[in-house]
Structure formats: structure tokens, C-alpha cells
Image: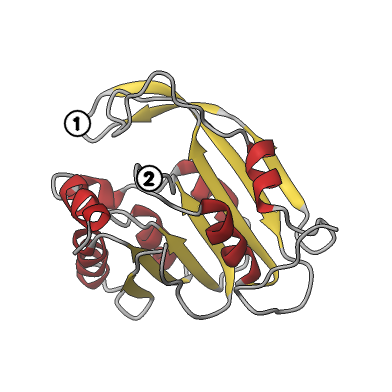
Amino acid sequence: MNEAQLFWDKHYQPLRTWGARANPLLVETAEPLSTGAALDLGCGAGGDAIWLAQHGWRVTAVDISTTAVEEVLENARAQGLADQVTTEQHDLTRTFPDGRFDLISAQYLQSPFALERSQLLRTAAAALRPGGLLLIVDHGSIAPWSWNQDPDIHFPTPTEIAAGLDLDPGQWPVLRADSPRREATGPGGQTATVTDNVLVVQRTGGPKDANQPDAKA
């Protein structure tokens, strides 16, 4: 077990109550869509995966933390959703789940450890089926319960995230790029106004190798 896995296992051990809560931007994005195959990257305690399964999606939920994926599987079984939810433990710096997906959600996929995030998200974009959406939601501010309390941290804007992906806009057009604010509730019940950096891209082209998405010319 490496240092990153140890960190995230420890992070999720006291957060079991988070498993019942879906991220509001995931709900907002997924509600109008036809159901299909979804991939939850960095699933945490599983609120998004469970919500998607409850609404008819077939979900692959992945995380570096075995604590997290075990929690998701336990919640899915308890709610009669085991046939809808597959869990996989992945260190996404090394491996990526197999398959093609109609929705890929990367909610707060930020880490204190080395992570080639742009390449990872490019791989995710290439794993979309035609018409599929990649939803990226990042922290745009520090909440009282955030693991990172560095006041000097730079949160990449949606425009910067899109530029880092360097995807062909003809095959992966940007549907949304903004930074909404909302009232959020932390694991201990505390509340704060937070900013989310949101990017949604859609795949319009045909399937390609998941490791070789087209870059812009």
C-alpha cells in the first residue's frame, strides 16, 4: 500500500455519513440525461454512485482507497443496488478502468500527491461513447472541512482545465465552463459558501483508444 492510498484510506474512515449524499452538480447534470453506463472517478464514500444507480444508471465506481470502494459496495448491497454498481480499486496514476461510458464524473479529483490530472482526464474523455459527457467539478475555494487549508493554493479555472486537456473541440466541445457558488454542508454538519469550478465536455466523434485522444492542431 503506497502513501497516497494510506492517506485516502485514513481520510475516508470517519466519513461514512457522506455516502448518502450526492454532489448537487452531478445531480443537476445527470437528471436530464438518458441512463446508461456511468464511471465515477474518485468515488469517495459513494454518494454519487448510489444516486446514479438509484436513477437507473449502471455505475462503475473507482477510488484509490479500499475503504471508499468497500463502503460503496456495502451501501449498494444494503439498498438492493448490487446489480447496478461495480466497484474497483484503482491508483489512477497507474491504471484506468476498462470500458466505454455515457457519463464520466470526476468530482473533486484533486490530490496532495503527484497526479497527471490532465492526462488522466484526457483518457477519461476518450473513454466516452459518442454523445457521452465528461463532468469535471473541482474545488474553487477552501471550506472549513477541506483537507487542503493552504491559503495560497491556486484553483485552476474551468478555462485553464479545458486548456490543459487540449482536446479537439470538434470531437469534444465544451458545453459548460463556469464557477457557481453554493451553500455546502460538511461532514460534521458545518456549513459554508463554496465555489465549484465546473467543466462539461461532450464526445461527438467515434470511439478511439482510451490512451490516445486527439489533441488540438
Disc 2 packing (10 Å; few <14; some 14–19; many ≥20)? few
* Residue 24, horizontal then vertical, whole percent: 47, 42
State whether residue 169 is above or below residue 127.
above
Q: Is residue 69 left or right of residue 178?
A: left
* Residue 89, horizontal then vertical, whole percent: 30, 70
Residue situated in front as seen by the camera: 172 or 55: 172
Q: Quadrant of the N terminus?
A: bottom left
The kind of residue on which mark 1 rests is Gly
Residue 84: which quarter of the image?
bottom left
Residue 159: which quarter of the image?
top right
The residue wearing badge 2 is 111
The kind of residue on which mark 2 rests is Ser
Q: What's the residue at 31%, 54% (across, down)?
A: 44
The residue wearing badge 1 is 188
Residue 3: which quarter of the image?
bottom left
What colour-coding does the image apply?
secondary structure
Q: Secondary structure at mark 1?
A: loop
Q: Which mark is residue 49?
A: none
Q: Is residue 125 left or right of residue 87?
A: right
- The earlier-in-sequence mark between 1 and 2 is 2
Whether residue 31 is visible here, answered yes or no, is: no
* Residue 111, horizontal then vertical, whole percent: 37, 45
